[in-house]
Amino acid sequence: MATVLCIMPPAPASSDHQIGTITIDGQKYFVSLRVGYDGVEFVGRLRFTDASSEVAYQDHGGVPGTSVSDAVLRAKEFSQVEVEQRCHRALAEKRRFGKLRNATDKMIEKIKYLNRVAVGLEKGLLDPESAKLELDKAQNDLMEIVKTLRNHAGVEDEPD
């Protein structure tokens, strides 16, 4: 008699964690850390969301950790000056089409998740019925993201 190993579907490809707030040049930013697993380690990227426009700017520098909580802890240990420097770097390298980029990032994360579920199903690590539901949900989520792309394409972020 064959047994099928039934485990929970894989965790999301990334997770967001609130770090705090900072004010630079009179502008308030919410600081969060988006943590993902790259197959070797957990890597976080600080995101600075403008409190008034809700446009997010991501620092390209990584915050590595042995776990999600380790990366979050390391980010919370940054001094005020370090966080401000990373915010300045993120603002200096900001994209013109932030909302389109955010939608694209969500789509990429969802595709990675879809692939992990499919691989887990193929390897017999997931219950076929649960995995099918997860695959259907991920596909529907992707379709919803795709529907928003047209609204963001060619629309530049508000100037500072």
Image (spheres, rainbow, N blue to C red):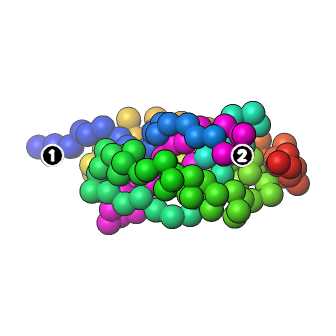
Disc 1: CA contacts within 10 A as few (<14), some (14-19) or many (>=20): few
The magenta segment is: 24-47
100 up-or-down from 143: above or below: below
Q: Amino acid at mark 2?
A: Asp
Where is mark 1, residue-wise? 2
- Return the x and y of residue 63 as percentages of the image width and height: 41, 58
- Which corner quadrant of the image does residue 39 belong to? bottom left
Residue 96, image quadrant: bottom right
The image shows residue 92 at horizontal and vertical percentages of 71, 62
What secondary structure is found at the residue carrying circle 1?
A: loop
For the residues marked 1 and 2, what is the alpha-carbon distance in whole angstroms?
64 Å
Main SS of the magenta part reads strand
> Relative to the observer, which residue lies in front, 15 or 13?
15
Looking at the image, which residue is at 66% across and 45% down? 24
Q: Which three-letter amino acid code belongs to the residue tagged 1?
A: Ala
Find disc 2 in the rendering and name its residue.
25
What x and y, as percent, mark residue 37? 39, 57
